Image (cartoon, rainbow, N blue to C red):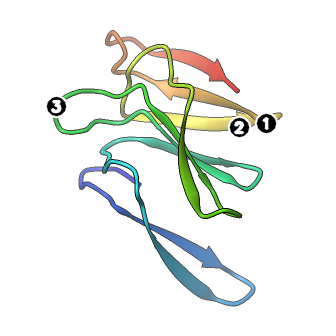
Amino acid sequence: MGGQAKCDILRCYTSVQNTCTRFIIDIRMLLAAGVCSVDQCIYAVGGYDGSSQLSSVECYDVGSDQWTAVTPMNCPRSALSLSVVNDSIYAIGKFCTGQFFLLNFN
């Protein structure tokens, strides 16, 4: 998701069946968002909407096929990486006051 082109498609590859399923993303199209998964959810975090960095965090629940806005980050950021440790998402990157730093949110 994200990168240099706006993305409104999510693809899910299933190795057991060797199939790729396409989903339309019903959240705003994002550039440079961080993406990760925790349990049965995929999170799209931050990003750039063409005019400003975003603090939004949105969750796609695979079981219900629904996107939900969840608690946003305390600082807008794009071009970030995410890591998951013990069900906590860590956002690593810059473009939040122009400095690198680590943010942990559950």
- Left or right of 84 on screen, residue 94: left
| Residues tagged 2 and 3 counted as in contact (Cβ below 8 A) | no
Q: Mark 1 = which residue?
A: 87
As helix, strand or loop, the secondary structure at mark 3 comes to loop
> Which residue is most to the left?
51
Which-is-in-front pick, marks 2 and 3? 3
Quadrant where the image shows the N terminus: bottom left
As helix, strand or loop, the secondary structure at mark 2 comes to strand
Q: Mark 2 = which residue?
A: 84
- Identify the amino acid type marked 3: Ser
Query: Label 2 vs label 3: CA separation?
Result: 28 Å
- Left or right of 51 on screen, residue 103: right
Crowdedness of circle 1 by 10 Å Cα count: few (<14), some, many (20+)? few
Asked if 37 appears above or below 55 in the picture, the reply is below
Which corner quadrant of the image does residue 21 belong to? bottom right
Point 38% across, 24% down: residue: 77
As helix, strand or loop, the secondary structure at mark 1 comes to loop
Point 16% across, 31% down: residue: 51
Q: Mark 3 = which residue?
A: 51
